[in-house]
Amino acid sequence: MAKKFLFVNRKAPYGTIYALESLEVVLISAAFEQVVSLVFMDDGVYELTKGQKTDAIGMKNFSPTYSALGDYEIKNIYIEKESLDARGLTLDDLQHLVWEDEDDDWAEKDSIHLVSSKELATIMADQEVIITF
Amino acid sequence: MKFAIQINEGPYQHQASDSAYQFTRAALAKGHEIFRVFLYHDGVNNATRLAVPPQDDRNITQQWTKLQKEHELDLVVCIAAAQRRGLLDEDEAKRQGKDANNIAEGFRISGLGQLIEAGIEADRLVVFGD
């Protein structure tokens, strides 16, 4: 019986290691055939911003890895609208993440869902395991 | 109830490990089961046997070792997080060509899959972090 796992990402990508080590857990979780969803909220929305360049800070740019999430059967990535608004960001500032639907001739479908804080509460209430980073 | 515990922060610097320890002890005292304690992020530092805290303070690592012995706890240190931070057991030290190891008695090093398995097997996964 698969459980519903939700990984909540709340930190900016390079100031601390939480974002990178969260991504490592998420990728491992895919091997366990669970129902995995992700949330990006607070400074966590910066993790998905486009065009990250890390040369000047001497750290590895791990943001391209997010585009592989669809291949790991991760189809639901929730972005909290209030967090984007508060930072002057829109969905256009974030990577466009998709998954391929094998039941629909491998059509590419959006993985990213913009949700309000209130909707997020409902989504969280529906989960069985929530891990926050 | 069957609990799994995740610790995301290092000892002394942050309350997470102390809270996890108190929670684990209280849960066991009430007759609950602790499926696994998983150390992640800086939480892996709770497993070093080389820390020497002042004598009039608690020794967090020794507290865990003692509790592990009493209840046969499964204390797991994430290998990826541990390697980054210089936490090695004897086998890992040999494999990586390092001249020392520092994992305390009662802890074992394993992969992230152990965390996901804990989430699957336990009724509740309780995360102690920042």
Image (spheres, coloured by chain):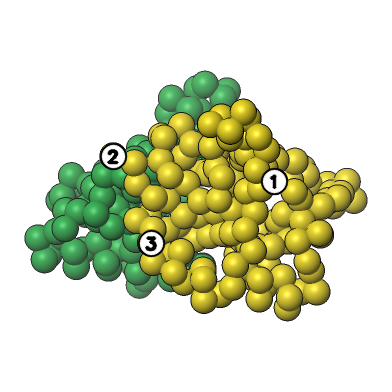
Q: Nearer the viewer, residue B5 or A48?
A: A48
Residue pointed to by mark 3: A126
Q: CA distance from mark 1 to mark 3?
A: 23 Å
Residue pointed to by mark 1: A97
Question: What's the chain of the residue with tag 2?
Answer: A
First in sequence: mark 1 vs mark 3: 1
Q: Position of residue B63 (x, y in %)?
A: 28, 58
Q: Position of residue A65 (x, y in %)?
A: 69, 39
Q: CA distance from mark 1 to mark 2?
A: 27 Å
The crowd level at tag 2 (other Cα within 10 Å; few <14, some 14-19, many 20+) is few
- Three-letter amino acid code of the residue under disc 3: Asp
Residue sticking out furthest to the left: B31
- Three-letter amino acid code of the residue under disc 2: Met
**Residue at (63, 30) in percent of width and height:** A106
Question: Which chain is green in the rendering?
Answer: B
- Three-letter amino acid code of the residue under disc 1: Leu
Dots 3, 2 in contact, CB < 8 A: no
**Residue at (46, 39) in percent of width and height:** A29
Q: Is residue B63 visible?
A: no
Secondary structure state at the residue bearing disc 2: loop
Dots 1, 3 in contact, CB < 8 A: no
Q: Nearer the viewer, residue A49 or A58?
A: A49
Residue pointed to by mark 2: A1
Question: Which chain is yellow in the rendering?
Answer: A
The crowd level at tag 1 (other Cα within 10 Å; few <14, some 14-19, many 20+) is some
Lateral position of residue A12 relative to residue B122, left or right: right
**Residue at (51, 71) in percent of width and height:** A119
Secondary structure state at the residue bearing disc 1: loop
Q: CA distance from mark 3 to mark 2?
A: 16 Å
**Residue at (15, 50) in percent of width and height:** B71
Question: What's the chain of the residue with tag 3?
Answer: A
Secondary structure state at the residue bearing disc 3: loop
